[in-house]
């Protein structure tokens, strides 16, 4: 059985004998590094600087104890059990597709392993994983919610556009229609699915403005007239105002809320001419 001492996840190691790694980078005495428990190829470990700045260092497992010892002062976790956290935007583990490392998802710190500073987090989707301090951010108050499409645009949009991935709409767990529409514009392979399932997303938006003509379900026709920042519906047959007169900010961009203030049955009005 091998008795070679191997690096431990989360332990801060200090270089006591300088060397040049396999990539030609110099590791100097006194520099401190940490291993995240995952970055390893064959017998070569990838160490990251505790400071988060500077180059990574590659260390062969058989040479590890020839250059490193545990630092006298170990980094203490800034988190405690019960803290609400999210994965940091600059963490290498952040993912929009891996549910065990979920982006824009809150989790609870359930355990902190003092021996290796492993922070165990249970996510709101019931997945569980372990992290180091630098991978997490503390959630205080109401976290700002980022949309799925924000994450795709920031991290994967170029890859998705280049590969034109064949994605099934039903596999995307999103209910916000605007986000679904945004994804359809980004990923051509699902746009046809979205248009078939949500045709209303691609219908031209009704713009209410002075000069528009509307037909009421009772057969009367109206024009939206304006004067002195106020608008009203005028019956084209009688020339009489037959609605409330309301104040608007822009004759050419009357909001849905403003339009609904004209009368109690605006849903009975159909736009017939822009």
Image (cartoon, helix red, strand yellow):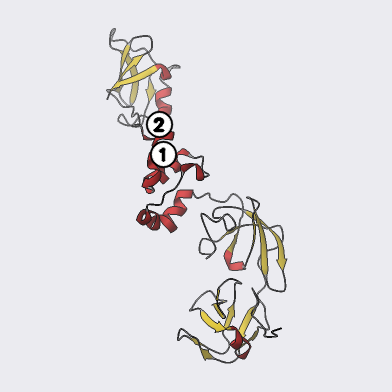
Instruction: Examine the rendered structure and indicate whether residue 83 appears above or below residue 190.
Output: below
Instruction: Examine the rendered structure and indicate whether residue 130 appears above or below residue 68.
Output: above
> Alpha-carbon neighbours of circle 2 within 10 Å: few (<14), some, or many (≥20)?
few
Camera-near label (2 vs 1) is 1
- Of the 4 image quadrants, the one containing the C terminus is top left
Instruction: Examine the rendered structure and indicate whether residue 271 appears above or below residue 112.
Output: above
From the viewer's side, name the closer residue of 111 and 234: 111
Q: Residue 200: x percent and y percent?
A: 40, 31
Reading the image, the residue beneath label 2 is 200
The residue located at (41%, 39%) in the rendering is 193
Secondary structure under the numbered disc 1 in the rendered image: helix
Quadrant of res 157: bottom left
Q: In this view, which residue lies farthest toward the top?
A: 238
**In this rendering, position of residue 23 left or right of residue 212:** right
Q: Residue 78: x percent and y percent?
A: 65, 67
Residue 206, disc: none
Secondary structure under the numbered disc 2 in the rendered image: helix
From the viewer's side, name the closer residue of 255 and 166: 166
Reading the image, the residue beneath label 1 is 193
Q: Residue 27: x percent and y percent?
A: 52, 87
Q: Residue 7: x percent and y percent?
A: 64, 79
The residue located at (45%, 49%) in the rendering is 149
From the viewer's side, name the closer residue of 37 and 219: 37
């Amino acid at each position: 059985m091998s008795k070679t001492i191997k690096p431990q996840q989360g332990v801060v190691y200090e270089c006591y004998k300088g060397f040049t790694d396999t990539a030609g980078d110099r590791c100097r005495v006194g520099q401190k590094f940490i291993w995240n428990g995952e970055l390893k190829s064959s017998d070569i470990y990838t160490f990251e600087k505790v400071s988060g700045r500077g180059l990574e260092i590659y260390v062969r497992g058989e040479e590890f104890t020839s250059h490193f010892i545990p630092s006298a002062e170990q980094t203490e976790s800034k988190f405690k059990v019960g803290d609400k956290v999210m994965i940091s935007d600059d963490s290498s583990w952040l993912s929009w597709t891996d549910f065990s490392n979920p982006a824009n998802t809150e989790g609870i710190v359930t355990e902190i392993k003092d021996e290796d500073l492993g922070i165990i987090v249970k996510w709101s989707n019931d997945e569980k994983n372990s992290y180091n301090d630098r991978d997490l951010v503390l959630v205080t108050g109401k976290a700002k919610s980022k949309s799925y499409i924000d994450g795709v645009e920031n991290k994967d949009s170029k890859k998705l556009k280049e590969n034109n991935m064949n994605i099934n709409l039903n596999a995307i767990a999103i209910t916000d229609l605007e986000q679904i529409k945004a994804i359809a514009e980004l990923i051509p392979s699902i746009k046809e699915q979205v248009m078939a399932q949500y045709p209303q997303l691609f219908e031209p938006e009704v713009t209410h403005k002075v000069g528009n003509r509307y037909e009421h379900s009772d057969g009367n026709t109206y024009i939206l007239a304006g004067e002195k920042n106020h608008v009203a519906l005028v019956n084209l047959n009688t020339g009489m105002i037959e609605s409330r007169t309301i104040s608007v900010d822009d004759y050419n961009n009357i909001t849905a809320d403003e339009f609904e203030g004209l009368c109690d049955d605006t849903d009975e009005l159909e736009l017939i001419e822009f």
